[in-house]
Amino acid sequence: MAVKLRQQSREPVVVERAAAYADVGYNVSLYPLGSCVLHGLGVYDEYRSRGQVGDAYELYDGRGKLLQRVAFGSVLSGYGPILNNRRADLVDVLRKAGGDLDIRMGTTVVSLFQMDDVVRVELSDGEELEVDLVVGADGIHSHVREHVFGPQPVFDTGWVLRCWWARGGQVPANVISEYWGVGSWAGLYPTQDQVGFCVGTPSSVAPPAEELGLSDAATLPVGLARYAARTTDLVRKNQEDSRRLGKIMFMSSRAASWTRDELMKHYPAERLAQNIVHSMTQPF
């Protein structure tokens, strides 16, 4: 969003908690819906050149037995490929596209105060800014959200996920693989030259829409209201899909895991994420 605003000759300020961007972070699987943002910024081709196209998804049980194989072409035909990249690739592409974008590294938001026409923002370095809009993109434990709405409930799956990188060439580069076991879960996500490994265990063991792009300070509240009205239901359904998938993927009961594995041999994978697939036809 900040990059798009800068491309429109506006003056956004990005507040980044990290002291420096480093070659760390998870694998990013970019679906066609997300690709629309990069097309809008004019950086899709460069991002794709750094990524690995995922052609198929393979689901195994905890013992390594293949339960189902899904060719993405049958699900996403007409929309575009799934791209697997390192998070560092995405950050690098966006930073270059932002040009002289004002990024405050090693800084956080200390307080927010709503005034008549602007929001006063106090930063951890002592500076105060007056801005038209504050966008909080600081994760599940968002301090910005707490400043606005107070403490928020957190959805806890009861599981812990650990991720690391390994050199490429050890698994097929165009196949995403997941293993759904009893009290365990694992995923392999290849990029061009590396493979992202993720292992889950129970915790006890382990660009904005057109409405906003065309808004100014006076019309911003109306633009936000229209954007929320158009996207809230879609986002909620996608979150419900993700949480339902999480309950199916993360199981500790042997009997429940066996039942799940038997069903997954015959249950179409695209139906598990039907709302996400449907959202491809209703982009933000």
Image (cartoon, helix red, strand yellow):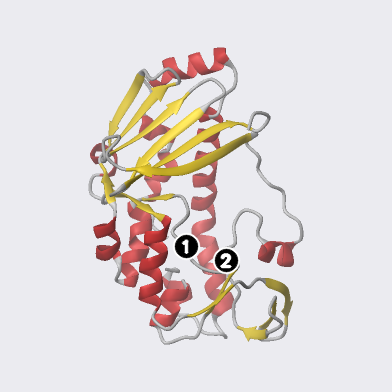
C-alpha gap between disc 2 and disc 1: 9 Å
Residue type (three-letter) at the residue carrying disc 2? Ala
Query: Horizontal placement of 279 versus 258: left or right?
Result: left
The disc label shown at residue 22, or none: 1
Query: Given the current orientation, which residue lies at the most extreme right position?
Result: 150
Residues packed near mark 1 inside 10 Å, few (<14), some (14 to 19) or many (20 plus): few
Query: Horizontal placement of 203 versus 171: left or right?
Result: right
Quadrant of the rendered image containing residue 143: bottom right
- Disc 2 target residue: 18
The disc label shown at residue 78, or none: none
Quadrant of the rendered image containing residue 76: top left
Depth order, front residue of 181/22:
22
Depth order, front residue of 186/31:
186
Residue type (three-letter) at the residue carrying disc 1? Ala
Residue found 49% across the figure and 22% down from its top: 181
Residue found 60% across the figure and 37% down from its top: 160
